[in-house]
């Protein structure tokens, strides 16, 4: 009886101390996360949400943090008009000080005006359309992931340096495929390459006999595919069937497990370019993967998860430094230079775009392998020798 | 029925007032229990009105005292708008609901009055927005005329569809409109004059020199810039409503109804089915186009995504859910289809599941929609019993 009374007293005293102690009386700061949580791109969106949630959880567990953080997730369904609605909702909420926003480029470009109008600083975590940062001069819009400019530039320089000089381009007619074609062609000329033919196709075109027969006549060194996995699979397997004697390279859209399964043995030696590096290449990659697994998320972080994680951390660092004030956070984010993060050093240029170098991957033995680690780079296999 | 007038009028005031109070609560609701309560309450009121004797009497009273009910709705709309004058997001939702309800009034004229299944409604809606984008971008046309032009262009382009629509019936009309929608979307995507897949930016609506985008106060009281948009959208709905009602009550409406119910009988009485179907189709299209033009100016952008088949299905589901031919039903259904998923954001990826369950429940227990259009009894003294 006496013991329980003592316990109650101790517990009571502990409660009072906890309530009075400044360390526990943290103000809560809200940060929005916006991405596609339903629909065809939900895997990427949920991965991004989980990753930024992880960043918030880790920060809240840190006793040195001055504020308690709360992530408010919104679903943009990858639809521009829904995106504007949720962006308005997040931006009009005075309690939200910043946002980790958008995976889909179409949504990302539609919402920039909304953020600028409401002066909500945001960090884009996945959309790769260059215009989101380069098409305006809004101080509120930042981006940690690279754009398709990086991918196109690297693709042009890397491939020409490997001795491929003539290219045939097959790209889909969405903004994704068209943009990829534009930047690849732009950087190919100065790099010394030449495009012998360009074929814009619908993303769901099934039969490429006409295009590939023409390509067979032109005999380019390489076929460059600007599109998503289904397009890549069809072109690669039909090249094989028609006996087109060329190699294939593709943009990040084909760098999926689906491409390797779909194209089967023909996938071997296909080159792809992606803004993200494998988790194991980041200094803290293993720690991130471990923490992610410990937090018990069921879904994979996906390729852009580390970017969402870094964007959330960048925002929370700014809040720690200048407090939960939108204007001050904007100024702080604008000045980001040489900031270490999971995805490497973050440097914003004059359009608040992180300077990222893309990476080269190659399909080797049924896996996408980081180029410097591959047997192709080591000279054990050659792309030319099928 | 003299002596019965007062309670009837009271019912005609109470029901719309209750509905708008519910809508206002839904717009302001933040916590999950509130949203669930509203949802359950809404469904309960529907059941009471439909399945009980006093409920049916009240519903009949609303119908009999139509002008009282409509006047109440107008006042209630203004009260709701004024209550939310500083809430950006709530006003955006009100404007979105009002504009899609306006488009659905047009769709109702086509589908419920004229009997033409239009599965390209979203394509025409987007066309209105594109018209606004081109006209505001390249000409100095006053913005009120731009709205009218949005309707005119949409109507004229509808003429393209007229011939195949008049020569086909039933499912085939649906197929023709589906094909048109896909065609238009693809055309907009590959055509760089209209911005390609990224779409176009549209300046804010500025009738008589009042730029809606920069309004921050009215008569010294601080308001959201969405307030004028919400007012304009509500006014547009009011006009569409009046026009549709006049059309329905006039001999034109009777001719269109007759042609839909039995084209052969109608033509033996000297009514040309082609002529009246065309009339219904073009009037409906004009309304859809005007609504689309204002929606585009409010959102500040338009892109081909909005013209997709899925978006058209959303508009059709509003018409069907609201009850074919009932104009107030489109408002209630727009609120369910557009505002409910937004309000379910806190449950993230599961929200569309709940939304779908609600839609299925409504259609299971009210197969005719929320407020179905009763059969017209042309012999009655009022002329119309609707």
Image: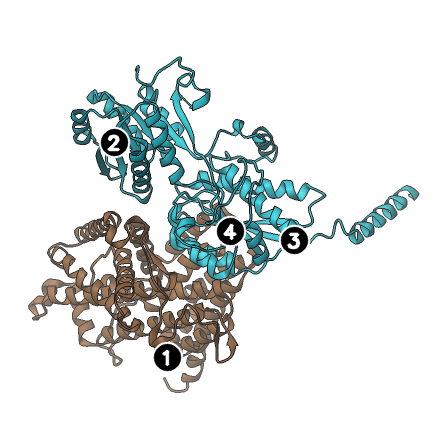
Chain colours: A cyan, B brown
Q: CA distance from mark 1 to mark 2?
A: 76 Å
> Which residue is outermost to the top?
A380
Cβ atoms at labels 2 and 3 below 8 Å apart: no
Foreground mark, 1 or 2, reads 2
Q: Is residue A188 left or right of residue A349?
A: left
Instruction: List the residue tagged with mark 1.
Output: B65
Determine which of the numbered discs, if any, sits on residue A28 in the image.
Answer: 3
What kind of element bears circle 4?
A: strand
Q: Is residue A7 left or right of residue B120?
A: right
Compared to A15, does A94 lie above or below?
below
Q: Badge 1 local density, few (<14 within 10 Å), some, or many (20+)?
A: some
Q: Badge 4 local density, few (<14 within 10 Å), some, or many (20+)?
A: many
Cβ atoms at labels 4 and 3 below 8 Å apart: no
Q: Chain of mark 1?
A: B
What kind of element bears circle 1?
A: loop
Query: Can see residue A370?
Result: no
Label whose residue precedes the other's in the sequence (2 or 4): 4
What kind of element bears circle 2?
A: strand
Q: CA distance from mark 2 to mark 4?
A: 39 Å
Foreground mark, 4 or 3, reads 4
Q: CA distance from mark 1 to mark 4?
A: 52 Å
Please tell me which residue lies in front, B243 or B86: B86
Q: Position of residue A129 (x, y in %)?
A: 38, 45
Q: CA distance from mark 1 to mark 3?
A: 52 Å
Please tell me which residue lies in front, A276 or B320: A276
Q: Residue at x 11, y 58 (%)?
A: B163
Instruction: List the residue tagged with mark 2.
Output: A194
Instruction: List the residue tagged with mark 4.
Output: A122
The quadrant holding residue B54 is bottom left
Q: Chain of mark 4?
A: A
């Amino acid at each position: 009886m006496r013991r329980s009374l003592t316990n109650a007293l101790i517990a009571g005293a502990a409660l009072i101390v906890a309530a009075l102690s400044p360390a526990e009386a943290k103000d809560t700061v809200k940060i929005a996360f916006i991405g596609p949580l339903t629909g065809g791109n939900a895997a990427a969106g949920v991965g991004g949400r989980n990753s930024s949630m992880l960043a918030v959880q880790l920060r809240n567990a840190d006793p040195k943090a001055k504020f308690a953080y709360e992530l408010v997730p919104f679903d943009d369904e990858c639809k521009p008009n829904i995106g504007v609605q949720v962006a308005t909702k997040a931006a009009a909420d005075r309690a939200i000080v910043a946002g980790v926003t958008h995976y889909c480029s179409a949504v990302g470009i539609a919402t920039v005006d909304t953020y600028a109008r409401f002066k909500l600083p945001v960090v884009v975590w996945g959309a790769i359309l260059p215009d989101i940062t380069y098409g305006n001069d809004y101080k509120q819009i930042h981006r940690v992931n690279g754009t398709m400019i990086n991918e196109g530039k690297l693709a042009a320089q890397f491939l020409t340096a490997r001795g491929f000089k003539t290219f045939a381009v097959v790209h889909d007619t969405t903004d994704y495929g068209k943009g990829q074609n534009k930047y690849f062609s732009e950087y190919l000329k100065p790099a010394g390459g030449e495009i012998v033919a360009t074929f814009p196709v619908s993303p769901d075109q099934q039969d490429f006999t006409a295009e590939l027969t023409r390509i067979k006549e032109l005999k380019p060194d390489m076929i460059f595919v600007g599109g998503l996995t289904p397009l890549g699979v069809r072109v690669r397997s039909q090249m094989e069937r028609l006996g087109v004697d060329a190699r294939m390279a593709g943009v990040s859209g084909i760098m999926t497990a689906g491409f390797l399964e779909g194209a089967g043995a023909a996938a071997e030696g296909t080159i792809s370019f992606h803004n993200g590096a494998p988790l194991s290449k980041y200094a803290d990659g293993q720690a991130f993967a471990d923490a992610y697994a410990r937090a018990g998320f069921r879904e994979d972080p996906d390729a852009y998860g580390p970017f969402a994680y870094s964007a959330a951390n960048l925002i929370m660092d700014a809040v720690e430094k200048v407090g939960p004030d939108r204007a001050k956070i904007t100024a702080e984010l604008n000045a980001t230079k040489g900031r270490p993060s999971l995805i490497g050093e973050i440097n914003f240029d004059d359009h608040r775009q992180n300077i990222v170098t893309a990476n080269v991957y190659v399909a080797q033995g049924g896996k996408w392998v980081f180029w410097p680690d591959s047997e192709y780079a080591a000279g054990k296999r050659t792309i030319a020798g099928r | 029925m003299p002596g019965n007038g007062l309670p009837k009028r009271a019912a005609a005031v109470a029901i719309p007032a209750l509905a708008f109070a519910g809508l206002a609560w839904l717009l302001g609701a933040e916590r999950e229990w509130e949203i669930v309560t509203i949802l359950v309450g809404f469904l309960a009121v529907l059941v009471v009105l439909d399945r009980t004797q006093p409920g049916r009497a009240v519903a009949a009273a609303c119908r009999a005292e139509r002008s009282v009910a409509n006047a109440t709705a107008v006042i209630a709309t203004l009260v709701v708008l004024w209550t939310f004058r500083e809430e950006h997001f709530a006003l955006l939702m009100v404007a979105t609901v009002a504009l899609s309800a306006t488009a659905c009034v047009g769709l109702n004229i086509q589908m419920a009055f004229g009997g033409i299944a239009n599965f390209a409604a979203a394509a025409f809606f987007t066309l209105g927005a594109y018209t606004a984008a081109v006209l505001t971008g390249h000409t100095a046309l006053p913005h009120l005329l731009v709205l009218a032009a949005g309707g005119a262009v949409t109507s004229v382009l509808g003429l393209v569809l007229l011939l195949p629509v008049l020569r086909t019936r039933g499912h085939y009309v649906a197929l023709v409109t589906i094909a048109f929608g896909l065609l238009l979307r693809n055309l907009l995507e590959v055509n760089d004059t209209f911005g390609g897949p990224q779409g176009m930016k549209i300046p804010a609506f500025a009738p008589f020199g009042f730029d809606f985008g920069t309004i921050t106060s009215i008569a010294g009281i601080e308001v959201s810039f969405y307030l004028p948009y919400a007012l304009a959208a509500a006014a547009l709905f009011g006009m569409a409503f009046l026009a549709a009602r006049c059309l329905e009550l006039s001999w034109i409406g009777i001719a269109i109804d007759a042609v839909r119910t039995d084209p052969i009988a109608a033509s033996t009485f000297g009514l040309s089915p082609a002529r009246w179907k065309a009339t219904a189709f073009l009037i409906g299209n004009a309304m859809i186009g005007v609504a689309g033009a204002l929606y585009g100016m409010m959102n500040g952008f338009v892109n081909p995504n909005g013209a997709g088949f899925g978006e058209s299905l959303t508009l059709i589901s509003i018409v069907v859910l609201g009850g074919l031919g009932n104009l107030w039903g489109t408002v209630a259904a727009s609120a369910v289809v557009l505002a409910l998923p937004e309000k379910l954001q806190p449950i993230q990826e599961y929200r569309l599941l709940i939304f779908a369950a609600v839609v299925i429940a409504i259609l299971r227990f009210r197969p005719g929609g929320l407020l179905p259009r009763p059969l017209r009894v042309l012999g009655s003294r009022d002329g119309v019993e609707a």
